[in-house]
């Protein structure tokens, strides 16, 4: 299995005391230093190309992000939650590029699965605007690349972050060959993700009330979401792997634990084995309690490696 990351992702800063901080990625990478992960093939993420980004984002958005390069030690605030420093543009290119490289490696058969340990996350980035800590829509860029570069007819993006992936949904909204499936807490930021949001019939949202535990989470995926993905029969599954639905996370109120993330990951892996030759690309999204994030990511990788 392939693990993609890059040092540039550690140099992106949103500001002091911001929950989306470099220590998140440090915690993840430290957890993956355990002996059980020694077989992971580790590689540096390349930068996404302009062409790859333009499949999702208009040129005005790409130019805005890549052109925002404040002086060393300073930041530019894009919205109340999202900022850029001198290294953010490169980090965003590496985060999106990791998904592209992962798709290439998995579709060429070099690895059955890949995990992208990157930041900034991507699933809140709308096609035309950054949002919610996110600059580029990483999973959507990867999905579009799978179709453009490898001729994959159908790609499914599965998102279990506690916050709804409004940016991914917007990017895939009117393309029936691309499916977006999400469980998330609602009401909660960003306010989207109602079950009535269907796109072209390719969008499936399962909003969960605050306090929802792993029993209900598993039932929703087992009875509603995974069967819909299987019926869609994608040639590739991309996972937006957010771990902020953990019961210890400070930004939300679901009650999942590490075993729940292992369960959903194994279920996705088994589904992939049935419908798309096991091909799964997973991309890190949220998770803001460092210890819970580290343990949950390790559980996710463990399940990806064995499923």
Image: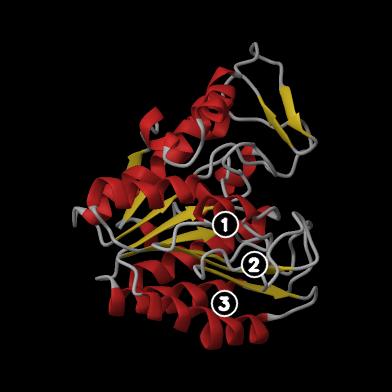
- Separation of disc 2 and disc 1 at Cα? 9 Å
Given contact means CB atoms under 8 Å apart, are the residues at marks 2 and 1 in contact? yes
Image depth: mark 2 or mark 1 in front: 2
Q: Which residue is mark 1?
A: 169
Q: Is residue 268 left or right of residue 224?
A: left
Q: Element at badge 1?
A: helix
* Depth check, front residue: 29 or 97: 97
In the rendered image, the quadrant that contains the C terminus is bottom left
Residue 206 appears left or right of 42? right
Labels 2 and 1: the sequence-earlier one: 1
Residue at figure coordinates x 65%, y 61% from the top left? 292
Q: Which mark is residue 201?
A: none
Q: Helix, strand, or loop for circle 2?
A: loop
Residue 12 position, x and y percent, is: 60, 30
Secondary structure found at label 3: helix
- Few, some or many C-alpha atoms within 10 Å of disc 2 (few <14, some 14-19, many ≥20)? some
Residue in front for this viewpoint, 41 or 198: 198
Q: Quadrant of the N terminus?
A: bottom left
Question: In the rendered structure, which disc, 3 or 2, sits on the residue that comes first in sequence?
Answer: 2
Q: Residue furthest left?
A: 109
Question: Which residue is disc 2 drawn over?
Answer: 197
Q: Which mark is residue 259?
A: 3
- Locate residue 191: give its quadrant: bottom right
Q: CA distance from mark 1 to mark 3?
A: 27 Å
Q: Position of residue 150 (x, y in %)?
A: 23, 51
Q: Residue at x 61, y 44 (%)?
A: 126
State the image quarter where residue 244 is shown. bottom right
Residue lying at the far top in this picture: please name it.
Answer: 71
Q: CA distance from mark 3 to mark 2?
A: 29 Å
**Residue 221 figure quarter:** bottom right
Please tell me which of labels 1 and 3 falls first in the chain.
1
């Amino acid at each position: 299995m392939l693990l993609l990351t890059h040092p540039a992702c550690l140099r992106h800063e949103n500001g002091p005391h911001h929950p989306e901080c470099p220590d998140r990625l440090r915690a993840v990478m430290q957890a993956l230093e355990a002996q059980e992960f020694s077989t992971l093939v580790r590689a540096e993420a390349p930068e996404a190309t302009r062409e790859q980004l333009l499949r999702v984002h208009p040129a005005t958005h790409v130019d805005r992000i890549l052109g925002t390069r404040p002086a060393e030690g300073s930041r530019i605030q894009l919205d109340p939650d999202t900022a850029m420093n001198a290294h953010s543009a490169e980090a965003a290119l590496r985060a999106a590029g990791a998904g592209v490289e992962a798709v290439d490696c998995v579709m060429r058969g070099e690895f059955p699965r890949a995990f992208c340990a990157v930041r900034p996350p991507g699933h809140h980035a709308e096609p035309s605007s950054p949002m919610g800590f996110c600059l580029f829509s990483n999973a959507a860029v990867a999905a579009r690349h799978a179709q453009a570069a490898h001729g994959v007819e159908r790609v499914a993006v599965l998102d279990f972050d506690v916050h709804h992936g409004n940016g991914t949904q917007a990017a895939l909204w009117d393309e029936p060959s691309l499916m977006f499936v999400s469980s998330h807490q609602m009401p909660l930021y960003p306010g989207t993700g109602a079950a009535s949001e269907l796109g072209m019939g390719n969008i499936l949202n399962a909003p969960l009330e605050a306090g929802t535990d792993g029993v209900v989470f598993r039932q929703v995926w087992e009875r509603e979401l995974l069967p819909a993905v299987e019926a869609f029969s994608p040639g590739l599954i991309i996972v937006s792997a957010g771990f902020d639905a953990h019961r210890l996370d400070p930004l939300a109120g679901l009650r999942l634990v590490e075993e729940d993330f292992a369960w959903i990951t194994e279920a996705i892996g088994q589904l992939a084995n049935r419908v798309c030759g096991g091909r799964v690309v997973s991309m890190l999204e949220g998770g803001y309690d460092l210890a819970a994030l580290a343990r949950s990511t390790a559980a996710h990788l463990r399940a990806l490696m064995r499923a």
